Amino acid sequence: MDLLAYFVRRVPSREDAADLYGETMLTAWKHINKLPAEPERQRMWLFVIAANTLSNHRRTAQRRLSLTDRLRDVLAVTAPTPDVEGAYAVRDAVLRLHDAQRELVMLIHWDGFTIVEAAEILGLNASTARSRYAAARVTLREALVDARA
């Protein structure tokens, strides 16, 4: 329990402390062949693993924050001002498509795949994907014309 208390005192949430404790125990188990023979050295050995686990956790958290900040900066500079009402109309029209058509349209337009690639992802032959996509386009066109009216 000393190790759990070690983490509880060093991280903001008890859930993180429990996760770090579990990760420490897993690492110790993987390296059990390096366990010292003397009981006091065993305790120290576990705390060394705990300190390394905590350091890794902190580095990962810092990297995540740094990446988030960089992404926020990039999006602030490059993101175009969207036509919010138009974007909602398109999203709503896409969400009203049948499941098979919706996934196909999303793969093509939102994820950047070609029709052939989307067909492969969905386990369809290319001609089936083309006909579903054509039908989806007609449905979307009608829905968006109705939304403007």
Image (tube, grey):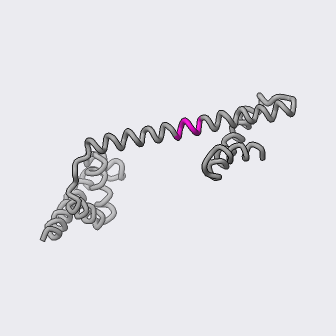
Image-quadrant location for residue 47: top right
- Quadrant into which the C terminus falls: bottom left
Q: Residue at x 28, y 46 (%)?
A: 112
Please tell me whether residue 57 belongs to the stretch shown in magenta: yes
Specify whether 149 is left or right of 113. Answer: left
Q: Residue at x 78, y 32 (%)?
A: 44
Q: Main secondary structure of the magenta part?
A: helix
Q: What number of labels is visible? A: 0
Please tell me whether residue 93 belongs to the stretch shown in magenta: no
Q: Is 39 or 144 nearer to us in this picture?
A: 39
Image-quadrant location for residue 135: bottom left
Image-quadrant location for residue 57: top right
At which x and y percent is residue 100?
32, 61
Q: Is residue 121 above or below residue 93?
A: above
At which x and y percent is residue 56?
59, 35
> Farthest residue toward the front?
9
Q: Is 19 or 62 nearer to us in this picture?
A: 62
Q: Is residue 85 above or below residue 29?
A: below
Q: Which residues are magenta?
A: 56-61
> Farthest residue toward the right?
38
At which x and y percent is residue 28?
73, 36
Q: Residue at x 73, y 37 (%)?
A: 29
Q: Is 102 or 8 nearer to us in this picture?
A: 8
Q: Residue at x 16, y 63 (%)?
A: 141
Q: Is residue 93 above or below residue 9?
A: below
At which x and y percent is residue 11?
62, 45
